[in-house]
Image (cartoon, rainbow, N blue to C red):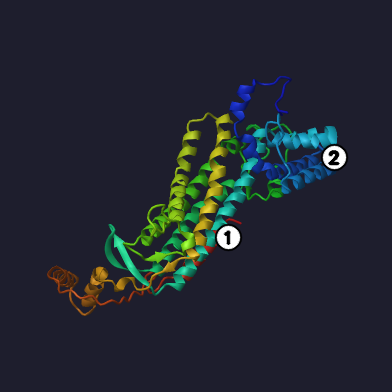
């Protein structure tokens, strides 16, 4: 069954090529299609296109379909084009001609748009919640290990003292920046396109403010052409947020891979969380973090894929946009999986506490020595030359102690303020 059927069937090869994996992907939209239809028919009844009796019958029928979906028993039958057709087909099969009335005042264009907006809202919430779980883990670990010093690097050369508190906290605050991107994407998704029909509105006196309220959207896409133009924009904004989080998580995964290497040996994990070699019996490989790094790199390519797919499309709906589902649906799922895996692995991480006792890290403390000399009254350039000369002639001896007190430094992590920042952004994605 096709909602656009005019009494003929398309060539089978054409149908398979144009539909692709859309039926399978549409299953993720089923609950939202029913939700959107329920709001739409309530609005139709309010403007006189349905009677109250018809509305009651239709709501009951849609409720039964919703229960089928929640039980995992909903499927798109062979010969039925998409989720919208399947819901309408099931409703008509159960209720007769009244089921055919639910499409008045809308097109599949705004129907799929509202489904996607509702879907992306929930997916962005899921990502935000997973990011919050990782954030909480990072802050907890930062507080727990705030006094454990480790080397800091620039150019991958030993540079200045850092700490595990500083390292964990850095990724926590970086996630707060990523959440700004996620909140912006959520705001784009949280607008109602229903009633824009095929992109040019309807001669029915639709009450679009009513469906906005019923579906819990923050606002309308007012201009009906702009509403249709949001197809692709919502996905692009969401993909940029996902890519931002993936960048942070990919950097974290790289750090862990490096810190696990015997040349660093800063952190370790229980044996059961690592993998081995078929030939080298000593190996404990960071496969989880290597796979995470690879997945995050792929996720950072998603905005570019969406940009190329949507570039230079003419005004209005174009079938190319169907392919966005192939890109964004797996990306949201993968992002949540990576975030939750990172949380799980970091909770099992063992931190080495005697790293800086190793003589190779003596030069970590040269800047601390320069600063001590400056505080005693020596001009900075003279202090710098003095310590530099000691390094060159081999007489430098480190004092393995730090006293950093300013905001965000080793001795003053400001994790409470970072948490307040993160939670304020998170509150916008509810």
Alpha-carbon neighbours of circle 1 within 10 Å: few (<14), some, or many (≥20)? few
Closer to the N terminus: mark 1 or mark 2? 2
**Residue 363 visible at all:** yes
Left or right: 412, with 20 as reference point:
left
Residue 318 visible in image: no
Query: Residue under circle 2?
Result: 54
Count of residue discs: 2
Q: Which of 149/109 is in front?
A: 149
| Residue 248, quarter of the rendered image | bottom left
Q: Which residue is mark 1?
A: 427
Give the CA distance from mark 1 to mark 2: 39 Å
Residue 373, percent from left and from top: 21, 77
Q: Is residue 134 above or below residue 61?
A: below
Residue at 52%, 61% in the rendered image: 344
- Crowd tier of the residue under label 2, counting other residues whose Cα lies within 10 Å: few below 14, some 14–19, many 20 or above: some
Which residue lies at the image location 45% right of the left edge and 43% below the top edge?
301
Residue 91 position in % (x across, y down): 79, 37
Residue sitting farthest toward the left: 393
Image spot of residue 138 (x, y percent) = 47, 65
Relative to residue 401, is residue 197 depicted above or below? above
Percent x, y of residue 53:
87, 42
Q: Quarter of the image containing the N terminus?
A: top right
Secondary element under disc 1, as helix, strand or loop, is loop
Secondary structure under the numbered disc 2 in the rendered image = helix
Q: Is residue 234 left or right of residue 361?
A: right
Point out the image quarter for the C terminus. bottom right
């Amino acid at each position: 069954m096709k909602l656009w059927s005019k009494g003929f069937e398309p060539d089978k090869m054409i149908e398979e090529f144009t539909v692709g994996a859309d039926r399978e992907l549409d299953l993720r939209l089923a609950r939202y299609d029913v939700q959107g239809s329920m709001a739409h028919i309530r609005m139709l009844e309010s403007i006189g296109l349905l009677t109250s009796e018809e509305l009651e019958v239709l709501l009951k029928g849609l409720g039964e379909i919703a229960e089928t979906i929640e039980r995992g028993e909903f499927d798109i039958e062979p010969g039925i084009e998409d989720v919208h057709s399947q819901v309408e087909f099931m409703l008509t099969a159960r209720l007769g001609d009244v089921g055919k009335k639910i499409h008045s005042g809308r097109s599949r264009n705004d129907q799929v748009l509202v489904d996607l907006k509702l879907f992306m809202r929930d997916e962005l919430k899921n990502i935000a919640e997973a990011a919050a779980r990782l954030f909480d883990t990072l802050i907890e670990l930062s507080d727990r290990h705030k006094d454990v010093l480790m080397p800091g690097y620039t150019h991958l050369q030993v540079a200045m003292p850092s700490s595990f508190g500083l390292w964990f906290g850095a990724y926590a605050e970086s996630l707060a920046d990523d959440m700004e991107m996620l909140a912006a994407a959520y705001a784009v998704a949280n607008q109602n396109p229903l009633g824009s029909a095929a992109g040019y509105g309807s001669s029915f006196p639709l009450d679009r403010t009513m469906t906005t309220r019923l579906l819990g959207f923050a606002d309308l896409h007012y201009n009906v052409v702009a509403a249709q133009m949001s197809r692709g924009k919502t996905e692009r904004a969401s993909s940029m947020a996902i890519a931002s989080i993936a960048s942070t998580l990919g950097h974290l995964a790289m750090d862990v891979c490096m810190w696990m290497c015997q040349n660093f040996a800063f952190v370790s994990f229980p044996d059961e969380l690592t993998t081995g070699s078929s030939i080298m019996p000593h190996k404990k490989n960071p496969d989880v973090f290597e796979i995470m790094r690879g997945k995050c790199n792929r996720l950072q390519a998603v905005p570019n894929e969406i940009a190329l797919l949507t570039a230079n499309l003419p005004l209005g709906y174009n079938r190319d946009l169907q392919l966005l589902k192939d890109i964004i649906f797996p990306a949201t799922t993968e992002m949540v999986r990576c975030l939750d895996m990172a949380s799980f692995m970091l909770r099992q991480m063992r931190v080495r506490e005697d790293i800086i006792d190793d003589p190779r890290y003596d030069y970590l403390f040269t800047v601390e020595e320069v600063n001590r000399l400056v505080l005693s009254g020596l001009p900075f350039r003279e202090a710098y030359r003095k310590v530099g000369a000691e390094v060159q002639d081999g007489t430098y001896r480190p004092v393995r102690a730090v006293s950093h007190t300013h905001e965000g430094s080793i001795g003053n992590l400001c994790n409470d303020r970072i948490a307040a920042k993160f939670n304020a952004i998170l509150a916008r994605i509810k």
